[in-house]
Amino acid sequence: MRKLFLIFSLCVLSVPAFCQLGVNLELSQKSYLRYENIFAQITLRNFSGKALIFGEGDTSNGKVEFAIEAPNGIPADKKKTDYNPMIGFVIPPGVSQTILVPVNRLYIVDKAGSYRIKAIINHNQLQHSYESGTAVFTIFNGIMIWEKQIGVPKLYHKEGELEPLSRTARILSFYDEYNKYFALMIEDKDKVFAVQRLGHDIGNEKPQTETDSLNRIHILLQISPKVYTYFLFDINGAIEEKEVYSKTDIPPVMVLDNSDGSVMIVGGRKAIKDIDYTEENGFPVMKEDNL
């Protein structure tokens, strides 16, 4: 369950006089669910002896690109976008700067399989391009646990638009080499609205799911023998509520009130952080002394 940072850097250290820029690439995960956001953390160390300004002028034009080898062995296609995540960065001489880049905003990386990636930095004040070492990550389709077609309530209709397409909500299970996770995906035939990791799949029970009168998605996930996490997501996959429950004589369950379409949690009690559970990598986990 421990979060692993994968660090890949490259600079011609054997000839330091020619190394004007050190480039370091970090990925916090080795595995992703299809359409999940993929962020690359890039750290640049300026050895050039002058400030590097990343802007749009003739003397400050610099950018980051990626060389990505897709599962079929050919380069991943770039998306049609003018987005340059380096704009606005200034790196003084001898100083390091770190930037988080959403790789899947710049490149098409939505097929299952293994990818190889490295970062490439270009700047018109530098004589050469500089690149990081190569990292490897894997994208999985996941195994579907639950699926439901849901309409878009009028509350979310945009003024003047036609009736929005119905959406498909799915809960998927996938393995990231160290842990097995559940994730929620919401999409229609044209767009993926959200991919949200829910927590660890401990292999005991599938998540409990309900939709209410607004077609919001309620999920109750058992994350240990005694601890449960409750989520409430809107139709776009934005989280509206998150609570942690502890099992008592009666375990927590979700109950749908058919009279008004509301959903409530019955049984259990609200869990207390650092007493009933702790958090690890953003996910509630049971305290070891409560096992």
Image (cartoon, grey):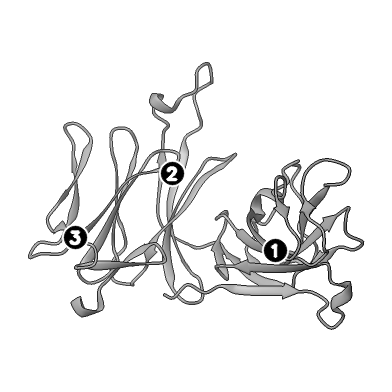
3D distance between C-alphas at marks 3 and 2: 24 Å
How far across and down, in percent of the image, does residue 17 sit?
88, 75
Identify the residue position indicated by label 3 in the image.
271
Q: Is residue 68 visible?
A: no
Neighbourhood count class around disc 3 (C-alpha, 10 Å): few under 14, some 14–19, many 20 upward: some
3D distance between C-alphas at marks 3 and 1: 45 Å
User: Would residue 34 appear left or right of 241 to someone viewing this image?
Assistant: right
Q: Nearer the viewer, residue 30 or 250?
A: 30
* Amino acid at the residue labelled 3: Ala
SS of the residue under disc 2: loop
Say above or below: 211 vs 9: above
How far across and down, in percent of the image, does residue 284 sit?
31, 64
SS of the residue under disc 1: loop
Give me the residue at 41% from left, 75% from top: 1
* Image marks 3 and 2: residues in contact by CB distance under 8 Å: no
Identify the residue position indicated by label 2 in the image.
237
Q: Which mark is residue 231?
A: none
User: Would residue 108 appear left or right of 284 to someone viewing this image?
Assistant: right
* Amino acid at the residue labelled 2: Gly
Q: Quadrant of residue 111?
A: bottom right
Give me the residue at 86% from left, 63% from top: 129
Q: Nearer the viewer, mark 2 or mark 1?
A: 1
User: Would residue 246 appear left or right of 243 to someone viewing this image?
Assistant: left
Ranked by sequence position, the earlier of labels 3 and 2 is: 2
* Amino acid at the residue labelled 1: Val
Q: Is residue 136 visible?
A: yes
